[in-house]
Image (cartoon, rainbow, N blue to C red):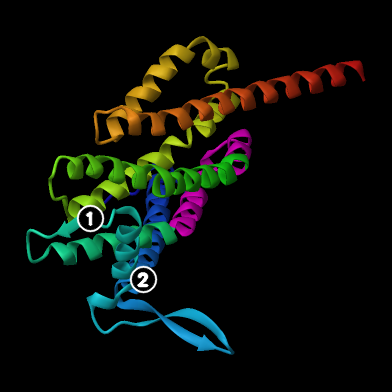
Amino acid sequence: MASGGSPGGGGGPLSGFFAHLEELRDRLKVIMYVVLLTFVFFLMFSFEKFNVLGFTVWLPIPALNLNEGISQQFFVAVSNFLLPGYVSTVVLTPWEPVLVQFKVALFLALVTSSPVITYEFWRFVAPALRAKERRLIVRVSTPVVVLFLMGVAMSFLVVLPFTFSFLYGIAIAMGAKPFLQLQEFLDFIILFSLAFGVAFELPVVMYGLSVLNIVGADFWKKHWRMAVLAIFFFGAAITPDGSGVTMMLVSLPMLGLYLAGYVAIVLRLRRRESQARSAKSS
């Protein structure tokens, strides 16, 4: 293959492109190794109770089979917490429980590996960003994590338990025996909780767009009606029932987050105006 460098030996655009590809490959390899190791850990280790110096502690030890792995323990704990006692889980194929445990292990691996994934992504893209953009990412990194965890926590602790109890309560009232397929249950709670976590990033998205001068503060005030419609549409799209009750549980917090994002943008704008006036007066 012909070299893409200049005759003087300096690297040209093509050599720079391949250098970026090489760096990307190295960082993807780190991410892949970390995710794979944590995936095996959650699949092949289990938490066991030990008494250490009079204290009860749970320590991970190698599991003898998939029936004792952390992924299985996690799934059982989540299903016992979310599902009412009168709902029975069922499997329709012999390999479905194995697929469920693999999905749970992969989900836990991605969650626990997220700091490494974020770090490698940041180190790859940081050289291409301007100083203002790097400062913005550093400034919003903590709110991004906190808001995402808040969204997932609210999904697990409030919305999902209410949703399952409300919907299956209707089935009981109609004299039906509730059954829930194992894989559908897992797919639903993962997608729903992730969607809820992403939805809670709304203030960060609003703040970032305003800091980068893509839109101004007046944009969010001018188009608040469209934002309300979009939020309710999103709430209706990710909730499973047509009653509107669970849609409100999703939409109302997002409306509060939209307001919080707008307030943060206005406060930042006023702070910058005050600093500009102080600079002029001095």
Which class describes the residues within 10 Å of circle 1: few (<14), some (14-19), or many (20+)?
A: few
Residue at x 25% of width, y 43% of height:
169
Q: Which numbered circle lies on residue 147?
A: none
The residue identified by callout 1 is 86
State whether residue 245 is above or below residue 66. Answer: above
| Tally of marks | 2
State whether residue 152 is above or below residue 60. Answer: above
Q: Nearer the viewer, residue 80 or 174?
A: 174
Q: Between disc 1 and disc 2, whose residue precedes?
A: 2
From the top left corner, tell me how far across and down residue 31 is, in percent. 39, 60
Residue 143 left/right relative to 160: right
From the top left corner, tell me how far across and down residue 271 is, in percent. 75, 24
Residue type marked 1 = Tyr
Question: Start and end of the magenta stretch?
Answer: 114-138
Residue type marked 2 = Leu
The residue identified by callout 2 is 37
Asked which quadrant contains residue 198, the reply is top left
